């Protein structure tokens, strides 16, 4: 070992081999600091502003226990109304909804988008919260999400989201990614121009008048001639920003949703999300409106570039292992652990035990980079993970139907 130190580690040519990775790492860290520094200045809005708020929930084959728990959490917020748009095939959720003081709209049109539109048209409140059927609210969400709307320029407000009762490695990793998002990307975009790129569909609140205004464009979205049936939250956020309104992330509003616990479903979900992001961001960057929000444009470009650059690091690790350069292997592995821990520090403060999951978190990050590239290569595909629908001949149709279910004529 001493011979290796004397003859190799003191030779500058040893480090020259890994210089490209060092330069790339410096650039990537600089970009991260540009995004992270503004996030440190983020503060949730605090005031007494209040508006009538209703909840719209598209429901399709939801877990009955989670669905009931979610309804109870929404009603505990004393919202003005809850509109559940339930697929005609979902008899179990229809029976659960009948137990509560909510409005039920039965739909036989496949797909989530039409259900959302039906919901906000049936609602009558100034604000409409679009909520996933597995999303559970804290007791003060309705109160907190109203506060940013004191600014008349705000058209939509997002919430802070985490995994509900995370169990197992993948659910805990998902929880880490969510904390990273809401203490980094969304917080910085809120500070730097009040232009959050995506108000997640798990809970996003909009002015109803704006939803009615953008309904036609929302339903008619296409990409390269193919109708879009997923990515509804990203599309709604973009339509709001396009029209000159602002979007805000209210981190004091806490909600929780369920996430997959198996790798196969996890990767399929990420593939669908990545396709949605590529479609939305590439379209946005080709239009003038996004350049009125330079920080938003920067983060879109940075995220796209990182899908490619993130894979350089495992490439160099593999190369070092082949060369049996164990010193570099140890240094790079240690750097991955330390650097990722720094980037997810807000999560580690909340859950210190996650420090031991950081190596797994790093590996999943590399897998997600591959998934993003696959998503770019298959960007025109329109598929859903939890809904049995697809685009066929330019039309959204059902691909399967639960046994014994009868679809209305």
Image (tube, helix red, strand yellow):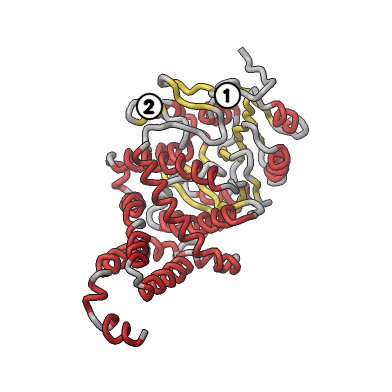
Q: Is residue 47 visible?
A: no
**Closer to us: mark 2 or mark 1?**
1
Q: Is residue 385 left or right of residue 95?
A: left
Residue 9 position, x and y percent, is 29, 81
Extreme residue toward the top, this view:
409
Tell me which corner region of the image, top left, top right, bottom left or bottom right, holds residue 14: bottom left
Residue count near mark 2 (Cα–Cα under 10 Å), binned few <14, some 14–19, many ≥20: some
Quarter of the image for the N terminus: give it: bottom left
The foreground one among 364 and 226 is 364
- Label 1 residue SS: loop
Question: Quadrant of the image for the C terminus?
Answer: top right
Place of residue 11 in the rendered image (x, y in percent of width and height, measured from the top left): 23, 81
The percent position of residue 340, horizontal first and vertical second, equals 45, 66
Using the image, determine if residue 370 lies above or below residue 399: below
Q: In the picture provided, is 131 more to the left or to the right than 28?
A: right
| Residue 408 visible in the snapshot | yes
Q: Which residue is mark 1?
A: 400
Q: Which residue is mark 2?
A: 226
316 or 324: nearer the viewer: 324
Secondary structure of the residue carrying numbered label 2: strand
Residue 388 quadrant: top right
Residue placed at 32% from the left, 45% from the top? 290
Q: Residue at x 51, y 33 (%)?
A: 384
Question: Would you call the spot at circle 1 few (<14 residues within 10 Å), some (14-19), or many (20 or more)?
Answer: few
* Most distant residue in the right direction: 99
Query: Viewed as shown, does residue 195 lie left or right of 351?
Result: left
């Amino acid at each position: 070992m001493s011979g290796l130190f004397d003859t190799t580690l003191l030779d500058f040519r040893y480090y020259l081999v890994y210089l490209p990775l060092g330069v790339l790492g410096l650039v990537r860290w600089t970009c991260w600091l540009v995004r992270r520094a503004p996030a440190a200045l983020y503060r949730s809005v605090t005031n007494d502003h209040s508006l009538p708020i209703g909840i719209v929930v598209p429901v399709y084959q939801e877990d009955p226990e989670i669905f009931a728990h979610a309804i109870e959490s929404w009603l505990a917020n004393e919202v003005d109304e809850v509109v559940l748009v339930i697929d005609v095939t979902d008899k179990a959720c229809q029976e659960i909804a009948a137990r509560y003081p909510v409005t039920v709209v039965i739909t036989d049109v496949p797909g989530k988008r039409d259900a959302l539109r039906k919901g906000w048209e049936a609602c009558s409140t100034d604000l409409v919260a679009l909520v996933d059927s597995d999303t559970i609210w804290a007791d003060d969400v309705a109160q907190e999400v109203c506060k940013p709307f004191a600014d008349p320029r705000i058209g939509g407000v997002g919430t802070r989201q985490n995994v509900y009762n995370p169990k197992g490695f993948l659910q805990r990793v998902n929880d880490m990614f969510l904390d990273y998002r809401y203490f980094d990307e969304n917080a910085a975009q809120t500070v730097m121009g009040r232009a959050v790129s995506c108000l997640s569909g798990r809970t996003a609140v909009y002015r109803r008048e704006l939803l009615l205004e953008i309904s036609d464009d929302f339903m008619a979205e296409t990409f390269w001639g193919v109708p879009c049936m997923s990515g509804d939250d990203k599309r709604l956020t973009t339509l709001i920003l396009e029209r000159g309104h602002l979007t805000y992330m209210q981190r004091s509003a806490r909600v929780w949703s369920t996430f997959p616990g198996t790798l196969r479903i996890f990767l399929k979900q990420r593939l669908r999300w990545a396709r949605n992001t590529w479609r939305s961001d590439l379209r946005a960057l080709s239009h003038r409106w996004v350049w009125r929000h330079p920080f938003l444009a920067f983060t879109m470009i940075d995220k796209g570039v990182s899908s490619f650059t993130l894979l350089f690091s495992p490439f160099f690790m593999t190369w070092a292992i082949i060369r049996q350069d164990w010193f570099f292997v140890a240094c790079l592995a240690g750097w991955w652990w330390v650097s990722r821990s720094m980037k997810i520090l807000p999560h580690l403060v909340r859950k210190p035990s996650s420090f031991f999951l950081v190596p797994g978190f790093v590996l999943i990050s590399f897998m997600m980079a591959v998934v993003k590239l696959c998503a770019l290569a298959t960007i025109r595909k329109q598929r859903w993970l939890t809904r049995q629908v697809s685009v066929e001949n330019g039309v959204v149709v059902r691909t399967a139907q639960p046994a014994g279910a009868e679809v209305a004529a």
